[in-house]
Amino acid sequence: MTPALASSDSDPERLHGLGDAALLFLRQGNRSFDAGDFAAAERCFAQARREAPVHAEPLRLHALALHQLGRAAEAVALLQQAARQRPDDALIQNALGGALGQTGQGEAALAALRRACELDPGLSPAWANLGNALAMAGRTAESEAPLRRALELAPQLESARLLLAEALMMLGRIDESAAQYRELLQQHPHSGQAWWGLANLKSVRLDADDVGRLQALVRRRDLPDAEQLTARFALAKALDDTARHAEAFHAYVDANALARRGFRWDAAGFARWMEHLRATFERSAFVPADVQFGAEAIFVVGLPRSASTLTEQILAAHPQVEGASELGDLGAVIREESRRRARAFPDWVADAGAADWRRLGERYLERTARWRERRPRFTDKAPANWMLTAAIRRMLPGARIVDCRRDPLETCWSCFRQIFWREHEYSYDLGDLAAYWHVYDAAMRHWSAAHPQHVREQVYEALLADPEQQTRELLDFCGLPFDEACLRFHEAERSVRTASAAQVRQPLNRDTARTARYGALLDPLRRALAR
């Protein structure tokens, strides 16, 4: 999201009615907000609210700081209060749309952002936020127009150009996406995010000139952490593209070390939790009343970078299947139930009966209904849903689960070369990656053996060796008739919201293995995976 404007010093109307004390705290808060010290800004804006409890502007500014601190639900409550006082205020509606989006209220967020654009057609951040919200909702084609409108109003608006470049990538317009990233680098040569966006177009190669510019960029000491991180990953990709593999390896190690700051993934704790989850489900018997319930859904799971996007693209080329890409609805339904029961998942599983699981399945299908408006079946390609295989079997006993597998060394190394902005903390350390893979492998082999009619291993290397036979078997597993269009998956017109968006627009490429180029440098990962 493009940040809403915080400062209101230049707009006396917004400050009308505030006393001197409230104004002082607002100005102090604005300075802290502009400096990126959101905790200090929040304290100042909270004090301003105490001085003027019902004034809309302290409410708006306090909400902006809360949003930046990850407290979006609190921000929504304040902004709704502010909107009741000033229903025709574009800045409030823009901020409300951003906060609603963060709390998962997508349709309400779109309504607020559209309202902001209507109220002030010249407010470029609102147009950018509307475009982003549409893209996040899977409506990528619709997002292009508001993003271009934002750039017409503010050609230097970095966030809008980043969003437009990403949207074009998702739509398969790779050359246009690359051009937008290059334009952004002309305007903002120190934008690590633009460099990473360009590098993340997997079919675009960076050259020796790019290497030099990136090496100079990462030496800068004034780059914010996010820009330094993205620039380092882009440099590693550029070194790889120019066949400087030893340098690329060490650049990836440095980039991942920076990404890993601030958190530690607990491999042993994760293994214990997965064993607890498996045992909890095994202890509670379950017989579904309707074994076909949920057959509309096809879950595509596995580790990232294991050809899950390719598998979904093959399925989405079928005339009966809508490719929904990475949906968060399954996890959201589980979290809703955990909040309702005031118990963490999977601790409440033993107390859930057939009616509960049916209710949860119905809730999931309700949340995903729009993906069945044009076609009767749909894919949910969130790789980490492999952890919820047992829950899927109870919620949606008719659903199919496709477990995407690729050579584990290639998979883990590919993950190490990727920035995952959330959820994949294990991916920034080769030892953690190997540990995660072992837990995944054991769990999915267990569930595949327990549910052979509903869980299929889709092996990438087998697909490369015999595309037609593997595609026929995949479609048969999903209960779909064979269709030649699935062999021409790269021609399917749809939004692909993953790092593989450029690759799946091309025919199958058998030359995708990369680890051999790194030789003995990857021996520690090889040994960890072989244990």
Image (cartoon, rainbow, N blue to C red):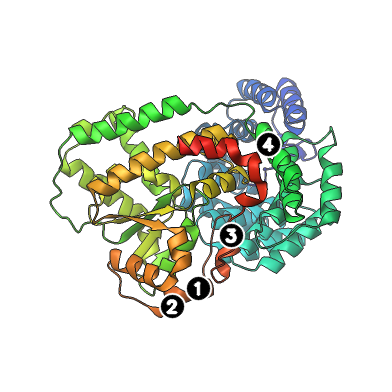
Tell me, yes or no, if residue 311 can be seen here.
yes
Marks 4/2 in contact by CB < 8 Å: the verdict is no
Distance between the alpha carbons at the discs numbered 1 and 3: 21 Å
Residue at the spot of label 4: 253
Mark 4 residue crowding within 10 angstroms, few (<14) / some (14–19) / many (20+)? many
Q: At which x and y percent is residue 504?
A: 55, 65
Q: Earlier in the sequence, mark 1 or mark 3?
A: 1
Amino acid tagged 1: Ala
Circle nearer the viewer, 2 or 3: 3
Q: Residues within 10 Å of mark 3 (few under 14, many from 20)?
A: few
Where residue 139 appears, x then y in whole percent? 52, 62
Q: Residue at x 36, y 52 (%)?
A: 367
Per the model, the C-alpha gap separating discs 4 and 2 is 41 Å
Earlier-in-chain disc, 4 versus 3? 4
Disc 2/disc 1 C-alpha distance (Å): 8 Å
Residue under circle 3? 512
Residue where numbered disc 1 is placed? 492
Viewer-closest of 390 and 319: 390
